[in-house]
Image: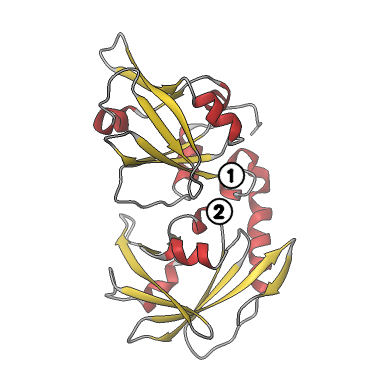
Amino acid sequence: MKRGRPLNFLEKARILERVPFESENPFFKIVLQRSHVSANDFSIPEDFAARYLRCKNGSSVTLRVPPSSRCWSCNFKVVPLKCGKYRRSFYNGWRAFALENNLKVGDVCIFELTNDTELSIDVSIVRVVDNPYCQLFEAQHRSLRTREKVGVLERAPFESEKPIFKIVMQPSYIINVLPLPVYTNRYFKNKNGSAITLRVPPSRCWSCKYKGSPLKCGRYRAKFNDGWKEFAKENNLKVGDVCIFELTDESNMTIDVSIIQGSEGKLNILYT
């Protein structure tokens, strides 16, 4: 697939499902196209805008890229269409936001409405250059990425009598929630919503929650949320790092986490 061709619906859906995000606030995710990063305005998904952005044409909107306190101001525009619907967009400031945050085609932006009264929106950005899943327009590298991932895990040996699982960090894993491998379900039976203690030896601990949900195909999707983002931030996790999770106390749901840094293709043990 050539870089100049816009992503089709299936490709965008495959990217977005690999960028998990959870919040009590309303939010939407979008894979940036050429029109998003080069135009003077940004079209907002119709269903989100109609439900949460019922503001007047010309209203001021504040965009912030966390954790920075820096903000950008733009305006909200409503244009009626012949079909009876409306096109809602950000303009008069969107272009500056895109340029100053160096947005690229294929980046994923997550827009979280943090204050619907003052129209404040946090924008989390997952970079296409850092995220192999966002590079679906370069499908010929897909098998190589899989081998690289396996190779990283092979170079991170770990033995224990306790149950363990290893995960290579992806960009989406370190900004919100951590998807868990399917086989880990056996360790967390009947634990949906339970508190999990993550401990980086020898002593520091963080709390998060385990969330599992059944899928239509009969399988099960599980993840760590409500605290995982803080764990990732405070341990300075980076794309390519390997986290080894060891279930040291099943009754109290305590997990020791060994972090192995992936730096320039080399593995440097930070905590064991």
Q: Is residue 180 left or right of residue 26?
A: right
The residue to which callout 1 is attached is: 127
Residue drawn at x 30%, y 61% as measured from the top left: 213
Distance from Cα at disc 2 to Cα at disc 1:
8 Å
* Front residue of 224 and 183: 224
Q: Is residue 17 left or right of residue 160?
A: left
Q: Is residue 214 left or right of residue 257?
A: left
* Residue found at the far bottom of this picture: 161
The amino acid type of the residue labelled 1 equals Arg
Q: Is residue 179 visible in the rendered structure shown here?
A: no
* Front residue of 218 and 199: 199
Residue 209 x/y as whole percent: 34, 68
**Earlier-in-chain disc, 2 versus 1:** 1
Residue 31 x/y as whole percent: 50, 36
The amino acid type of the residue labelled 2 equals Pro
Q: Are marks 2 and 1 in contact (CB under 8 Å)?
A: yes
Q: Is residue 64 visible in the rendered structure shown here?
A: yes
Label 2's element?
Answer: helix
Q: Quadrant of residue 50?
A: top left
Of the numbered discs in the image, which one, if any, rests on residue 171?
A: 2
